[in-house]
């Protein structure tokens, strides 16, 4: 009826239709999945940038392919969570040789740089990823269940009030006072240094969040008995009793025995 | 030494006969020293005010205690932290108040006695302890008379039956005391673990698939069936076991026996004093007891490498069942925990 319909048997009609379909599909695809299309090159950038950072800062000890040396572990398969924990808490790069790498306030890299290094290490082999904010939100966990799990799995090293404790030969389990929820989660997942691994099959992600909720609770609640004296048990309490209490008693005894002037 | 060369110091002089010279006169009591409050009326008034202040402090403390007790309330719509803050405040105020109330009275009374009450020395001579000879003779006579009147020497039947009765009287006490508690029996030598028991998590429960345990993991486990039974605390205390997975190549021959693919299970009860041995160092594979620092090497079948423990931790031989869950291959082959007298 119209000119278009009249030319539908034209030899070029098939070619035009195929071309038109390809254009439509291509435009629709580009509209439907823009995020993925944009994210892939960014992640690749992260990995490349992370590799540069790794070669400049970590490769001296961990090897140019993160394969490890006699004195530094292999980082193949440790995952982004381990990098985020070790570098994000200032434990790595190691500041000095010693029984263990202490957390330091001196974090050497920006968050973006840590993310890039984590992306590079994660690209070497699959490993635990950095947890999402939702997975470590203490408000969503049960402090009661977390306390139960903490006393069984964590308290023997980290102390019943999460104040840390000594291990052998100068190693120690740190106080969890300033530890962020993400750091606690990553430590359980990756088992840094002397700490055993508490994988998701051992302590489920929900239970990890419960433990974080309990640590947050114990660290923010007031001490009902008065001074907590560090919350490290009989050592500080005994010291206070012997030094303060006994000196006060001896003072009273001396005063009782002294003649009035 | 016939004469002393200490004369100049006046400490001692020995005469040629070897006797101490009677050189010293009894110096008597030192002259009484009057206190400030005895001689100066102003000082006496000051001491009086100090005593009254201490007693007043006690009264203030008592009132503070009462006010703290009634004013700090725990009722109402409180968050946990608000509640604990009030408990803290209440404890501090009650403690301070009671301290002032009691210490004020005591300190006031002592200060009163020391500064204001008379402190002149008085001398009262002691009496002899020994009674007079007549009293002593009388007492002996009374005892002898009593012995003769009882006739014990003349009536052996009474004497012997009394001795028999006295010897038998303590026996009921032995029987009654024996039944005050159950005898320990073989409890120290047994544990709740037996062949085929599934290993379940201590906190949270649930059996454990061998494939789910990552190398470097530690799981605190109990035998299946003891989770809900709160009454069996003693069984739970004996059943605590630590499960560790290592790289199988790290285990020596003794440690490999009874292990499953690098997973080993040891009693968590220290062989020294029975503390829970739970401090596992993932990199050194050392297992540390928090009480006395006994250290066990997991790669060497939990041999003692440091500290006061004398025996390795007993091992629980494990394997997997048809569904892949970890089970005990057998119970413990030796008594767990510290040594005891009858331990073989």
Image (cartoon, helix red, strand yellow):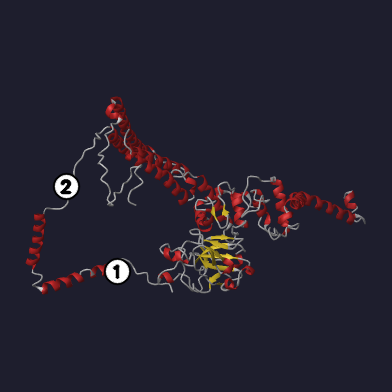
Q: Residue furthest right?
A: A11
- Classify 10 Å Cα crowding around label 1: few (below 14), some (14-19), many (20 and above): few
Which chain does the residue under circle 1 lie in?
Answer: B
Q: Specify whether A261 is left or right of B154.
A: right
**Which quadrant is home to the C terminus of chain A?**
top left
Residue sitting nearer the eye, A148 or B302: B302
Q: Residue furthest top?
A: B42
Q: Position of residue A148 (x, y in %)?
A: 49, 56
Q: Which residue is mark 1?
A: B178
Q: Position of residue A54 (x, y in %)?
A: 74, 52
Q: Position of residue A43 (x, y in %)?
A: 74, 51
- Real-space Cα distance between discs 1 and 2? 52 Å
Q: Is residue B21 above or below residue B297?
A: above
Which chain does the residue under circle 2 lie in?
Answer: B
Disc marking residue B127: 2
Q: Quadrant of residue A260?
A: top left
Label 2 SS: loop
Q: Which mark is in front, 1 or 2?
A: 2
Label 1 SS: helix
For the question of whether residue A134 can be seen, the reply is no
């Amino acid at each position: 009826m119209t000119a278009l319909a009249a030319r539908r048997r034209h030899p070029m009609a098939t070619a035009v239709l195929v071309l038109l379909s390809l254009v439509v599909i291509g435009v629709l695809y580009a509209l439907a999945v823009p995020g993925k299309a944009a994210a892939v090159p960014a992640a690749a950038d992260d990995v490349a940038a992370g590799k540069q950072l790794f070669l400049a800062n970590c490769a001296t000890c961990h090897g140019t392919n993160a394969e490890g040396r006699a004195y530094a572990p292999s980082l193949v398969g440790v995952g982004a969570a381990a990098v985020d924990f070790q570098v994000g808490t200032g434990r790595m790069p190691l500041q000095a040789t010693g029984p263990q790498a202490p957390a330091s306030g001196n974090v050497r890299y920006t968050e973006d740089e840590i993310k890039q290094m984590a992306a590079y290490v994660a690209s070497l082999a699959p490993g635990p990823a950095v947890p999402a904010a939702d997975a470590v939100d203490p408000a969503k966990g049960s402090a009661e269940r977390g306390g139960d799990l903490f006393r069984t799995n964590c308290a023997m090293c980290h102390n019943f009030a999460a104040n840390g404790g000594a291990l052998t030969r100068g190693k120690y389990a740190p106080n969890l006072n300033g530890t962020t929820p993400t750091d606690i989660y990553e430590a359980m997942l990756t088992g840094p240094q002397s700490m055993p691994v508490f994988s998701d099959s051992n302590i489920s992600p929900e239970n990890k969040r419960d433990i974080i909720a309990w640590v947050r609770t114990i660290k923010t609640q007031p001490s009902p008995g008065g001074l907590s004296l560090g919350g490290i048990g009989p050592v500080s309490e005994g010291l206070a009793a012997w030094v303060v209490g006994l000196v006060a008693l001896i003072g009273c005894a001396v005063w009782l025995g002294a003649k009035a002037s | 030494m016939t004469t002393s060369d200490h004369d100049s110091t006046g400490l001692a002089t020995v005469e040629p006969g070897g006797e101490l010279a009677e050189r010293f006169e009894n110096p008597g009591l030192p002259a009484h020293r009057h206190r400030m409050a005895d001689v100066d009326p102003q000082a006496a008034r000051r001491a009086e005010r100090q005593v009254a202040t201490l007693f007043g402090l006690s009264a203030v403390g008592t009132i503070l205690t009462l006010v703290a007790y009634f004013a700090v309330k725990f009722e109402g719509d409180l968050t946990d932290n608000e509640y604990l803050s009030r408990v803290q405040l209440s404890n501090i105020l009650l403690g301070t108040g009671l301290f002032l109330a009691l210490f004020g009275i005591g300190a006031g009374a002592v200060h009163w006695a020391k500064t204001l009450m008379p402190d002149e020395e008085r001398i009262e001579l002691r009496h002899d302890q020994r009674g007079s000879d007549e009293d002593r003779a009388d007492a002996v006579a009374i005892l002898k008379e009593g012995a003769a009147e009882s006739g014990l020497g003349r009536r052996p039947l009474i004497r012997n039956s009394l001795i028999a009765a006295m010897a038998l009287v303590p026996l009921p006490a032995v029987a009654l005391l024996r039944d005050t508690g159950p005898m320990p029996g073989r409890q120290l030598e047994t544990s709740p673990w037996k062949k085929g028991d599934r290993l379940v998590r201590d906190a949270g429960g649930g059996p454990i698939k061998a494939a789910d345990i990552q190398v470097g993991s530690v799981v605190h486990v109990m035998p299946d069936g003891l989770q809900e039974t709160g009454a069996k605390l003693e069984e739970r205390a004996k059943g605590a076991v630590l499960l560790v997975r290592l790289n199988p190549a790290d285990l020596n021959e003794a440690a490999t026996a009874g292990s499953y693919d690098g997973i080993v299970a040891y009693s968590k009860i220290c062989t020294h004093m029975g503390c829970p041995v739970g401090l596992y160092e993932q990199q050194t594979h050392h297992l540390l007891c928090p009480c006395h620092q006994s250290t066990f090497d997991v790669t060497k079948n939990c041999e003692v490498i440091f500290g006061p423990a004398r025996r390795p931790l007993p091992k629980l031989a494990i394997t997997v069942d048809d569904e892949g869950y970890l089970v005990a291959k057998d119970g413990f082959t030796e008594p767990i925990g510290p040594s005891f007298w009858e331990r073989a």
